[in-house]
Structures are given as structure tokens and as C-alpha cells.
Amino acid sequence: MPTSDRLDRVDVLLVRALSEQPRATALALAKLTGLSRNTVQTRLARLEQRGLLDSFERRISPKSLGYPLTAYVTTTVTQRKLDDVADALATIPEVLQVQGISGPTDLMVHVVARDADDLYRVAGRILAVPGVERTDTALVMRELVDYRITPLLEQAVNVDR
């Protein structure tokens, strides 16, 4: 198995089968892919160890927990405080993800909220973090394309043939 972050053809076949049937056992995945059960178990363990499989958390909808609003808060940060800001943002439960980005702002903060007043509170907590200089909040009005990886898996399988 390669040691890079890039998946080889066997990994892609396995991950594609797993995305189609996330609850499949190693034996079921072996049947779907034509691999041995031991190969499936070994490959899955290595993918998990390398951090190449996302956590189960991604499958849980914040709506089901009472957070129907989604927003992105672009954040400008004092550069020398970037790590401290990231650590502070990680303590806010409504912050789902923080990405460092290029451009006029430094961070893209993905947040959820119960309603507009709650979003105002969450945005205020972000702005109050020492090192945060400025924020801009954009409310997600409608999701047009849900998070997906299957098209890339299909492309990877077809490219390697």
C-alpha cells in the first residue's frame, strides 16, 4: 500500500464500495470489490490510520440537533495569533469547520445556529476571540449541491484503467 495521501486503485475501489454501502461489513465489502476479507480489513485500517477516511460525524445533520441555519463567517485575523484564534474557535460548539484561505480574509468558519438571534450570538463569539480583527457573515439560503465524493471516486477508477 502506498504511503502517500494518494489512494491507489484498490483503495479507490474499496472506498467507492464503502460510500455506496457505508454499513457494509468487511466480508460484504470484499464481495463487492472482489478483494479478500483480509485485504479489505488491512486497507481500511491503514486508511483510518493515515486519516484518509472522514469521521462519522460528517453524516450527522446539524438540523437533526436543532441547528437548521448554516452560515460561513469569513474572518480576518492578526497573523501572529492565527493558531490561538483557531484553538479558540474550536471551543465554540456551533463552529463545524475552520479553513485557512487565501484572499482578503484569513479564515472561512463554517457555523450552524438555531435561528437568526442565535447566529448573531455565534458571530459575536467569533468576533470576540482575541486576534480576530473583522468578520463577515453569509447565511446559506439553500444547498444546491450536497457534499459528495462519489464523482471523484468514479473518475479515479476510470482514469486508472
Image (cartoon, helix red, strand yellow):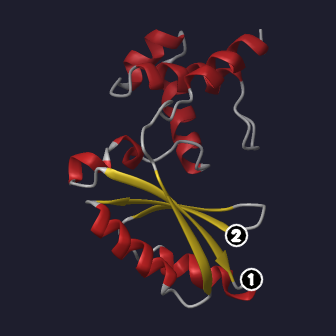
Label 1 neighbourhood size at 10 Å, few (<14), some (14-19), many (20+)? Answer: few
Is 153 on the left-hand or right-hand side of 93? right
**Quarter of the figure with the N terminus:** top right
User: Residue 29's spot in the image, x, y percent?
Assistant: 44, 19
Residue in the image at 63% along x and 27% along y = 11
User: Residue 100's spot in the image, x, y percent?
Assistant: 68, 64
Q: Secondary structure at mark 1?
A: helix
User: Residue 78's spot in the image, x, y percent?
Assistant: 70, 85
**What is the spatial separation of the Cα atoms under label 1 and label 2, in whole angstroms?**
9 Å
Q: Quadrant of residue 150?
A: top right
Q: Is residue 124 above or below residue 1?
A: below
Number of marks in picture? 2
Q: Is residue 158 above or below residue 22?
A: above
Residue in the image at 41% along x and 45% along y = 58
Residue in the image at 65% along x and 21% along y = 10
The residue closer to the viewer here, 98 or 3, is 98
**Quarter of the figure with the C terminus:** top right
Task: Give the amino acid type for the residue marked by disc 1 in the picture.
Answer: Gln
Is 68 on the left-hand or right-hand side of 31? left
Residue where numbered disc 1 is placed: 79
Is 79 on the left-hand or right-hand side of 107? right
Q: Quadrant of residue 112?
A: bottom left
Q: Are marks 1 and 2 in contact (CB under 8 Å)?
A: yes
The mark found on residue 106 in the picture is 2
User: Residue 23's spot in the image, x, y percent?
Assistant: 33, 27
Q: Is residue 116 above or below residue 19?
A: below
Is 87 on the left-hand or right-hand side of 24? right
Residue in the image at 51% along x and 26% along y = 40
The residue closer to the viewer here, 7 or 123, is 123
Task: Give the amino acid type for the residue marked by disc 2 in the picture.
Answer: Asp
